[in-house]
Amino acid sequence: MSVSSPTERQLITSFVDALRELPEVEADLDHREPARPGDRGYDAQVDLHVAGKSYVLLIEAKKAVFPRDVRQVLWQFREAGLGRSAEQGKEPFSLLVAESISPGAKEMLRSERVGYYDSGGSLYLPARGAYLYIDKPPPKTLAKSMRSLFSGRRAQVLHALLVRHDDWFGVTGLAQEAMVSPATASQVLSELERFDWLTARGQGPAKERHLREPSALLDAWARQLATIRPPTVRRYYVPGTKSDALEARIGQVFGAHDVAYAISHEAAAQRYTPFLSNVSQVRARVLGGANADAAIGDLNARPVSEGANFSVIEAKSLGELLFREQLGDLWLASPIQIYLDLLRGEGRAKEMAEHFRKERIGF
């Protein structure tokens, strides 16, 4: 066995300890050297006994694994397994141990029936006669990394890629489209390549990327919403005004005060793809400032804690209003933003979100 770092040794030890906690399981780290001189082949070997059956686990240890890394891991396992046969009645079995394994990488490994274990405690071992599957939340390191990718200015890059998913982008062009620095755009593209969601062409400064898997990216963003702090919302009641008339007034008053805004949630989705019989509340993303406060005052909007018919989602920069679309005299949030906002809603909002995604977004 040849383990290259303390982190890998610790991961393998944690994996063996996790196996030993299971009923009718015995696991021992085999400290013998690999059978073929000069051929490392794998990082560790574990002798496993489960309910009377014996196996030899050939362990490959990694720090972090994403879908892009899985192909290399599978190749390593095939190379290590060439010519290897059952050893004294023990069936050899390849297994990946890593500090973190992304959900997409886990899915790929399961489809290839390759076992894995991560530091969060997730375990998959599809051995004949000893099928083990424990699914736990991702380790904090991966969860934090994913959360940062789907928030702040990085989220603006994702937004641009989803809205322009048919286009090819260089780093500079994408940065301009997303209203971020080239460094931020480059970092996000590098992260997305690890998930195998991009296609690339060209080299060096001329290199361009295309979002090959917009549905997978949007699904991942939807899953991350629960981990991201929602924006600040101010709730108001505007007397004597129904939803349609209130939207028209917002367009007129905010336009007169030169306020940057975008209607979102149910009111916006209803404009694109009618789904509800009526909408009881208008919600808008609004760039804050003196102009916005004056416009809200002109609406005669009263702050309330319940019974609101108008809610303001505070935007801190124009980047949070990216790709808004003007429909008549009203600005609507981009379809991607509307979908994500609906997923945070209550009542039939999530049902409306799925209808809206199918009919308006299309992936």
Image: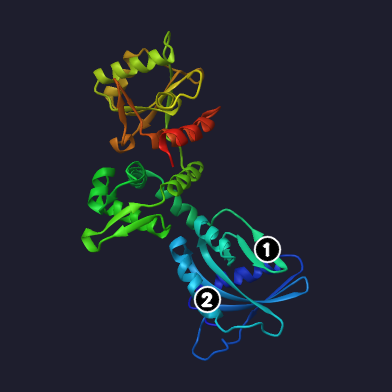
Colour treatment of the image: rainbow
Question: Tag 1 or tag 2, which sits nearer the N-term?
Answer: 2
Seen from the viewer's position, the closer of residues 22 and 81 is 81
The image quadrant that residue 362 belongs to is: top left
Where's residue 321, x and y in %? 32, 34
At 41% from the left and 58% from the top, the residue drawn is 196
Q: Which mark is residue 78?
A: 2
Please say if 94 is above or below 136. below
Seen from the viewer's position, the closer of residues 249 and 3 is 249
Image quadrant in which the C terminus is located: top left
Query: Dot 2: few (<14), some (14–19), or many (≥20) neighbours within 10 Å?
Result: few
Tell which tag, 2 or 1, sits nearer the viewer. Answer: 2
Is 21 left, or right, of 196 in this rendering?
right
Residue of label 1: 132
Where's residue 30, x and y in %? 63, 82
Image quadrant in which the N terminus is located: bottom right
The image quadrant that residue 290 belongs to is: top left
Please say if 284 is above or below 128. above
The reply to whether residue 301 is in sight is no
Q: Label 2's element? A: helix
Where's residue 150, x and y in %? 41, 46
At 56% from the left and 65% from the top, the residue drawn is 112
